[in-house]
Image (spheres, rainbow, N blue to C red):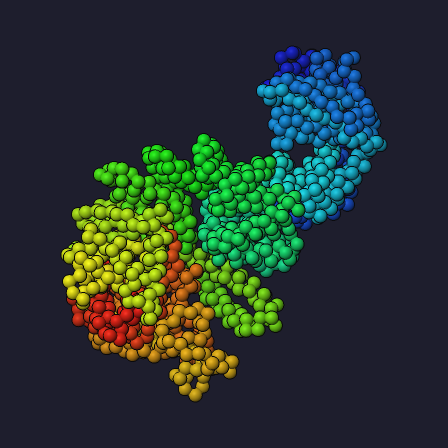
Amino acid sequence: MNGTAPDVNEVKRLLAKGMVPAEIRARWGSELAAEPRRYLDLFDEVRTDLADLPLLEKLDSLETDSLEDMFPEEEDDEDTVAPVVPIRPEPVDAVRDEARSPGLRRWGRWLAAAAVLLALSSPIWFGRWFGGTDRDRPAPVAQLVAAPQTTQLAPGAVQTTSLRVEPGQWVRVTALGPPEAWRCEWRSNGSLLRVSDAGVRGERHTGWWFAQGATVRIDWISESAAPVAIQWSVTEVREGMTAEALADAAGAAVDRALEARARGGAQDKEAALAAYSEAIDIWTMLDRPKALATSENAAGLVAYQSSRFPLAVELLTAALARREEMGTPFELAQTLNNLGLAYLGLGQPRRAAPLLHRALPLWEEGGHERETAFTLNCLGGAFDQLDQPEQALDYYGRAREMLLPRDDKDSLFARALVANNIGVIHNYLGDALRASGALEEALRLWRRLDTVDGEAQTLVNLGWARRLAGETEAERELYRRALTLARERGSLREEAFAQHNLGMADLERGRLDRARSGLQAALELRERQGDARGAAWSRFALAEVAERQEDHPAARRFRTEAAQAAAHIGDVNLQVQVATAAAQAARGQGHWLEATDRISEAVTWLEGQRQKVKNFDFRASYLASRMDTFATYIDILMDRHRLEPEAGHAAAALEVAERARARGLLDLLHDAAADYWLGPDPALVARREALLAELNTTERRLRRLAQRPEKNREEIEGLEGKRADLKADYASVERRIRESGLRFEHPEAFQPLSLAEIRKAAPERGALVQIWSGSERGYLWTVTRDALDVRELPDRARLDALAKSVLDAWSDPSGARTPEAAQTLADLLFAPETLDAATRRLAVVADGALQFVPLQALPVPKRLRTSPDASRIVDRVDLVNLPSFSTLALLPEDSWPDRADDLSLAVYADPVFSADDPRWGDAPPASAGELQVAATEPAVPRTRATIADRLDRQARLPATAAEAAAVAALFPKADRVVRLGFEARRDRIVGGDLAKRDLVHLATHGVLDGTHPERSGLVLSRYAEDGSRIPALLGLYDIYDLELRAQLVVLSACQTAFGKEVRGEGVLGLTRGFLSAGSPRVVASLWQVEDRATAVLMSQFYEELARGDVTPVTALRSAQAELRRDPRFAHPFYWAGFQYHGAWW
């Protein structure tokens, strides 16, 4: 606007004089043209005082009845909220009835008055508004139907077209030109009807109707610095229309839109948009803002579903402005949700999240649970795009909980969306198994609903999960199926996803031309949709293709564009990946400073994101999925070390390795030490126990049904779905338990140790050793109190192969005692800088498969062998396993006591596993079926087995009772608790039985789940003395929640040192759990240890401890060295399976 209007007194004075000065006309006239409604109240206010003026009589005489019928009241034509369509549609008949209601007549006459007032005072304005010149006679619209016209505009120019609308004609004009380069103003009888800009598509539809006929003037206005060509035509003329007939026409257009949406195809969505456009024109002409907002809301959602995100934003922004003024809370929440969803489609989560947060309380206050779940799902999507997976999963989990009890079609649709989105997060975190479970649930729901678009999207994500699992052929097949479905339905968004992922699959296989073609197609599709986030990821992938094709300028251009888009939309994950790729490219070209700067920037972003994740598991998974960034940093620094050996790059590389190591464990230990942890919420713990019991019951039922799968197929499918729901609920409750126990929302982060601090922590007469296995090469740092040494190792694949070969030989009593791979490993790891004749202690941070090798059993390098009795590392060196060097700063500083015989002691051993256990006496509680299963079980070696699928049928371990008695006898003065048989129960441990014990010994079966370590645990008694079944598995999460003061925990069970290896974090398993629970020292096993040999080993170990003046690590070394001298147990299978973890002091 050019200025502000005069005040009331000035208007009165000017009107009384019958004149409007030129300077006032210029200011007031332009503002009135843009916003005529602002001045209606002004005219009303001055009218009474000026009623006897001749000028006002002239104005009154120009009023027409047609103006009074133009603005009837309005009503909703439908209500729609994303992501489900439509929600609570209103009958169209109600819309039509409302269209016949009395109009708002108040302001029409004064609009005309304002126009005439300005016209009378200026011939120039009169000519511009009415177009009444001999050379520009208005053309009857009937002559222009379907006759395309072209208007050429020079930069900044204006051209005018006049059209004559006959009485009762409804006219529709379509104009098409360059997007956002022009606008047009539509006027009639001096009144501004509409101002339309070109918008994101460059296309506009406009409709008019006048009961008495009118001249319409169109001013085409250039907003471009370049010439603009606008093509326009009169696309429709309807004769004999009234306001009532127009309202009926709008209702019919809405009917057509709903019918087209129900069909659901791509062309149907276009038809729906066209029908809504017609309705929007009519509601605009009739000045029915409420009905207009409803159709804009619905059209915006259709535009979103058609992947036309900018158009969706445009329509929904207009709807929101109207609904904020006059909408109900339900309507306002609808449009807030949908507009947020449209911004997510554009990859703009920072604009989406505030809108969604505004919608949420409106739903909740109205008691709309289903709609609340929809918005929670959208908020999950926003946090997903913001690279905050934990928050995203929390919102998805809340949505899922609200939807599970509902079985209506819309709720099932939303459940499918939520399950798909949960799968995407687990893919992102690198957890293929969890992702597959969620995505397969989504796929079942999509097929039940016959929703092809959703099925195509989930197939793409399932392909991603297959890639993570290494199933490359299955991956490509899923992408191809998704692409076919997307093209059949015309789903551009899903087509772009499938094209992108197919391109990535080709890139990984080195098919660079095919990859470039597919990714370019995906980029073009995403740009057409306005999907900024998706387009940025496609550009990033194209940069990788160009880099491999040695097209470095193109690679740099694509990376720069991707980085700019990532910064704009707030995608930190993409920023990290682009910076990492840029550092790798700079490294390849020898630009060392640029490479270092870019990778340092990437790690800083990465650590900032990691600290936003409170849940231990997600922090570990998140960092593991970004470990390539740390690996690149280390490689760059070690490259520079080779060029500048004295510049400190090797030390910097070690510090980077520490930043990547065991950060989840360090956070847990730090939170506990700083008293950030309050303990779990009792209500959540109770919920977890109930879910665990129900899950166990479901698992048992499934195992029985699986014996006759064909007969029980339907019940099995139902129970598998129930099991998936229970597992998801259990995981959600576990997350909430961890989060609810934090005293502060964001406790102070622990900073890993510097090299100077690491040196101070090194043992006397020993060294700290860190192994890093990279994809190109490995590194081994040796740190003593006065020196740092680093040397190269083979790459990860070679080191893992050697480790696996050794583990295979030693975990089988028939394998070689000293395989060739063991000697090779010893020579690689124990060079003179690491192990010499004076070395008495090594604390090792291993990596990869080396974490599962008992390094103390490796042969001593030949240069150090002095006798056949000292041929193994265990014969001369205490070897300690650490998750990271920085762990040392958080372990308790208390030394092992000189006298151990008065330590308080807890021993759990020889639980009751089965119904045929002889300790039942005359009244076993088992059913005949259970007894039959136990009776027909084949004989197995007496190992402390870890077979999860035989959890119900594990054999008794009689040697553990003797082992417990021997341990207890060695500590006669101790405050002792010995739990055997029915007393060895999980609920006692969870209830705090171990809390005040200095020494804890647990001798039982172990259960290992190498994929999901949280399902690993120790199996305790399955039965109470009264015969009732009780929960038996002391799981990893139970262990995390224990508050121990134990100086030492010994896990005398199978594979308790085993677990899932998470890159950077190390082995997630029971050992890590007990360290986190507060014990600084843990002894655990690497394989299925033999029952008799373990009993002997443990007896010798505790005898050493009881004598005093010896630390647990030395006691274990002595016991293992002694046992291997016994010919019965000379093979490493019998004596080498136990590792020592934690403090050596």
The answer to whether residue 1047 is left or right of residue 250 is: left
With 722 as the anchor, is 216 left or right in this view? right
Q: Indicate whether 657 appears above or below 943.
A: above
Q: Please give the name of the residue rendered at 55% of the width and 71% of the height, measured from the top-left corner.
A: 706
Q: For residue 241, which quarter of the picture?
A: top right
Q: Position of residue 196 (x, y in %)?
A: 66, 28
* Rendering quarter of residue 1005: bottom left
Q: Residue placed at 22% from the left, 53% from the top?
A: 831
Counting from the top left corner in percent of width and height, residue 823 is at: 26, 59
Numbered label tally: 0
Q: Quadrant of the N terminus?
A: top right
Against 993, residue 32 (above or below) is: above
User: Which quadrant: the C terminus?
Assistant: bottom left
Left or right: where 59 falls relative to 390? right
Q: Residue at x 16, y 65 (%)?
A: 867
Between residues 682 and 673, which one lies in front from this camera angle?
673
